[in-house]
Image (cartoon, helix red, strand yellow):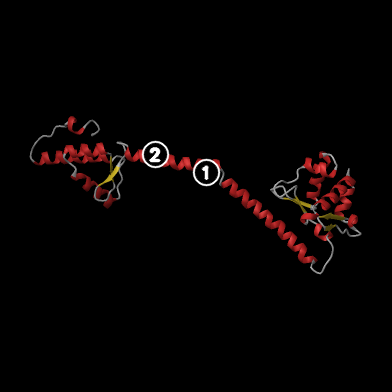
Amino acid sequence: MIIIDQKKYYYLKLKENFFDSDEMIVLENMPDGYLYSNILLKLYLRSLKNEGKLMFNDRIPFNATMLAQVTRHNVGVIEKAMKIFRELGLIDILDNGAIYLLDIQNFIGRSSTEADRIRKYRNQIETEKGNVQMLQQKSENCTPELENKERVKKEKSKSDTEAQKNSPNSKNPHGTYKNVMLTDEELEDIKTKGFEYLIDRLSEYMKSKGKEYADHYVTLLSFAKREDKANATSKGKVVEYDEKRWGKIIG
């Protein structure tokens, strides 16, 4: 069988026992088996120009409808045939739709380098499989939708961080070891009450004892209240609780 294209001759050289192989015997004993063998030969011939690779062109693979048209069989028969060819190991279909006729290198003439040619062909299939998977992964990881989602996520995170930083309710680190967290309003209140010095004391205490407090502002109020009582008691005075000074949150 010879195909001529622009003065190049492509030929398929079948062995005399081609139809006696296990695959062909199984294939032709199936319902519509002779149709399948006819389709297989047509696929071999059509793939010769690309040394066994079957594509409509460099970008577009064959689908069942297109194969039905070029082989002149109906779509249902083509779909069944392709499934059977794959199960018998006669073809391999890559993720990009390229169809490889796996045994075709056994039928393209004979030479002293036949084994090398077959090995090269198999390597070509594996290489293309890897390229297809790599392109798919890259496409999945770099879709415009994903890139836009990541960009929006980063911008939102940046915006939230800035908003939190500029918020009057955001807590900032203070004290000797920068571990006392206070809002600007809380810090101003502490300064007004006159016990700003307790911030460093609390910072050093937390650092040395490994202590943690849920609310550093409330803790400072408690420290200040106890210190006021202690100072007053040492002078022999009775200390009354000043709700206006310390607020209702101090017990």
Q: Give the left or right position of residue 116, taking residue 127 as reference.
A: right
Q: Residue at position x 64%, y 51% from top?
A: 133
Q: Amino acid at mark 1?
A: Glu
**Which quadrant is the C terminus positioned in?**
top left
Q: Residue at position x 73%, y 62% from top?
A: 120
Residue denoted by label 1: 147
Q: Give the left or right position of residue 196, taking residue 70 as reference.
A: left
Which is closer to the viewer, label 1 or label 2? 1
131 or 239, nearer to the observer: 131
Neighbours of disc 2 within 10 Å: few (<14), some (14-19), many (20+): few
Q: Position of residue 223 (x, y in %)?
A: 21, 41
Q: Amino acid at mark 2?
A: Asp
Q: Position of residue 30 (x, y in %)?
A: 88, 45
Neighbours of disc 1 within 10 Å: few (<14), some (14-19), many (20+): few
**Which quadrant is the N terminus positioned in?**
bottom right
134 or 65, nearer to the observer: 65
Q: Give the left or right position of residue 24, taking residue 146 as reference.
A: right
Mark 1 and mark 2 lie on one chain; the one further toward the N terminus is 1
Residue denoted by label 2: 160
